[in-house]
Image (cartoon, grey):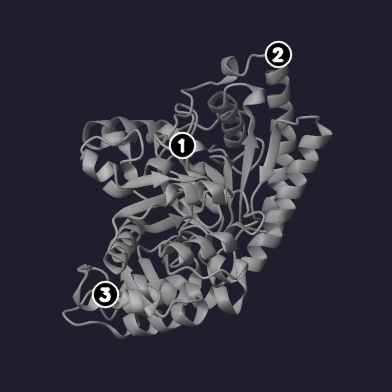
């Protein structure tokens, strides 16, 4: 009998997952298309590797085991798996066609909807991945300012100008690496130090798991304006989750350009670049950025349905209220157990369970917690990315599971035998930056 969302008698049987993994090793580098959801981010030999189906807030692996999913596909699932309103919109459009020899009206309708919801979205372009749009924003900034350098803070995809800063930078010319640097979030002095006379833009995630302090975003806006540098908000995570208009609405700070992808279409592949009309106007003649599938109609239909649902039902408020209950419950539990090295941080829609190095090797402690949550039917990689299909019952069950798992962690930490309790291969680190700060998503 496959494991379910309960305290199971043993860890799940994952024979089909492991067999598929062996096949993947022969054909697919890293055995995955998305590093953050690959086998290296799970305790190998214990955790499921391949999904079969999903509905609402639950997912089933290829062996039939059921889990409560706190990853939400690493962000794109904002409403829930197989959400009726979105799926019906996709089906209706599928009957009419997917990609055409002419632009489709949905391109106009969705652009107008984004402009209504997102502050400063005077002009809008579509593509398929977040990295596309981050790179388009950087190119636009260079064209608009006539400058070359980029200051980064956060994670911005796989393209040369950003990934050259990390230890996975082979194949990127030194001349490209030299054009980018990093700064520290919530430290305006570090941003000012990183900007020079040849800086075109500062690109950052406006909210990681740490919220802005001491007016950081306002000071950043003022600094960029003063220096003639464009401010880009990478809102892949914050867009349409923290507020209907993203971080710009939540914090009342306008970026010159902003980028979106996760959450906007409930899992369909689309990304968005939005911003000031005078900057975006360069896309008409001066800056080339066109893609065959930018106007693909299924994703646009999904985007329209998702955004309308987000706005009509105020999905961000639901996510943040529900997530705050989980965060509060977790922190109360850690305090009761006298585990000062455990803390849940972040806005409710996306929180992170931090386990301090004071408890030992972070990869070991994280692996043990993940392993034990999997036994209890929960998919977890450190964060809780909620979607609209998560319920109070899901939160109650998660707190019950943590109530069983955290005492196990405490005992293992006290006895200094965490590693010996891990039944498979430990979680691997994603990557690290070579200069400046380590992006939060790379650390966890």
Whole-Å distance between the Cαs marked 3 and 2? 62 Å
Q: Nearer the viewer, residue 242 or 81?
A: 242
Does residue 204 sit above or below 360 in this rendering? below
Taking the image as shown, residue 395 lies to the left or right of residue 203, namely right
Residue neighbourhood size for the residue with mark 3, other residues' Cα within 10 Å, grouped as few (<14), some (14–19), many (≥20): some
Identify the residue at image location x=46%, y=23%.
425
Taking the image as shown, residue 278 lies to the left or right of residue 213, namely left
Identify the residue at image location x=20%, y=73%.
286
Residue neighbourhood size for the residue with mark 2, other residues' Cα within 10 Å, grouped as few (<14), some (14–19), many (≥20): few
Task: Find numbered disc 2 in the image and state the secondary structure of the residue it sits on.
Answer: helix
The N terminus lies in which quarter of the figure?
Answer: top right
Which badge, 2 or 1, comes first in the chain's sequence?
1
- The label on residue 282 is 3
Residue neighbourhood size for the residue with mark 1, other residues' Cα within 10 Å, grouped as few (<14), some (14–19), many (≥20): many
Q: Position of residue 174 (x, y in %)?
A: 23, 38
Q: Which residue is mark 1?
A: 48
């Amino acid at each position: 009998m496959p494991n379910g969302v309960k305290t199971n008698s043993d860890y799940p049987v994952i024979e089909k997952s492991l067999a598929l993994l062996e096949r993947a090793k022969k054909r697919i580098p890293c055995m995955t298309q998305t590093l953050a959801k690959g086998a290296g981010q799970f305790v190998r030999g214990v955790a499921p590797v391949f999904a079969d189906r999903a509905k609402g807030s639950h997912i089933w692996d290829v062996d039939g085991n059921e889990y409560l999913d706190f990853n939400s596909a690493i962000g794109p699932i904002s409403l829930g798996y197989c959400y009726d309103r979105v799926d019906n919109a996709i089906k209706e459009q599928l009957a009419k066609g997917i990609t055409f020899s002419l632009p489709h009206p949905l391109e106009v309708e969705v652009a107008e909807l984004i402009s209504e919801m997102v502050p400063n979205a005077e002009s809008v372009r579509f593509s398929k991945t977040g990295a596309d749009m981050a790179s388009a924003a950087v190119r636009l900034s260079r064209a608009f300012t006539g400058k070359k350098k980029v200051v980064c803070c956060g994670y911005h995809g796989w393209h040369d100008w950003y990934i050259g800063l990390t230890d996975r930078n082979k194949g990127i010319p030194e001349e490209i690496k030299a054009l980018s640097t990093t700064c520290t979030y919530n430290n305006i002095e570090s941003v000012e130090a990183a900007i020079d006379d040849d800086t075109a833009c500062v690109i950052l995630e406006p909210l990681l798991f740490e919220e802005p302090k001491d007016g950081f975003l306002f000071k950043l806006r003022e600094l960029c304006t003063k220096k003639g540098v464009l401010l880009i908000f990478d809102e892949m995570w914050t867009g349409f989750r923290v507020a209907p208009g993203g971080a710009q609405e939540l914090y009342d700070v306008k970026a010159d350009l902003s980028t979106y992808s996760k959450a906007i279409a409930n899992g369909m592949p689309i990304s968005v670049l939005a911003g000031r009309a005078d900057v975006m106007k360069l896309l008409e003649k001066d800056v080339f950025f066109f893609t065959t599938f930018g106007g693909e109609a299924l994703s646009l239909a999904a985007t329209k349905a998702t955004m309308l649902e987000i706005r009509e039902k105020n999905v961000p408020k639901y996510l943040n209220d529900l997530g705050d209950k989980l965060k509060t419950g977790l922190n109360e539990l850690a305090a009761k157990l006298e585990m000062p090295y455990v803390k849940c941080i972040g806005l409710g829609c996306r929180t992170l369970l931090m386990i301090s190095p004071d408890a030992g090797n972070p990869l070991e402690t994280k692996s043990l917690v993940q392993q034990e949550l999997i036994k209890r039917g929960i998919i977890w990689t450190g964060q809780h990315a909620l979607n609209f299909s998560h319920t109070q019952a899901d939160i109650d069950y998660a707190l019950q599971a943590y109530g069983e798992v955290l005492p196990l962690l405490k005992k293992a930490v006290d006895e200094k035998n965490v590693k010996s309790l891990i039944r498979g291969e430990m979680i691997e680190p994603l990557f690290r930056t070579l200069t400046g700060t380590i992006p939060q998503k790379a650390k966890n």
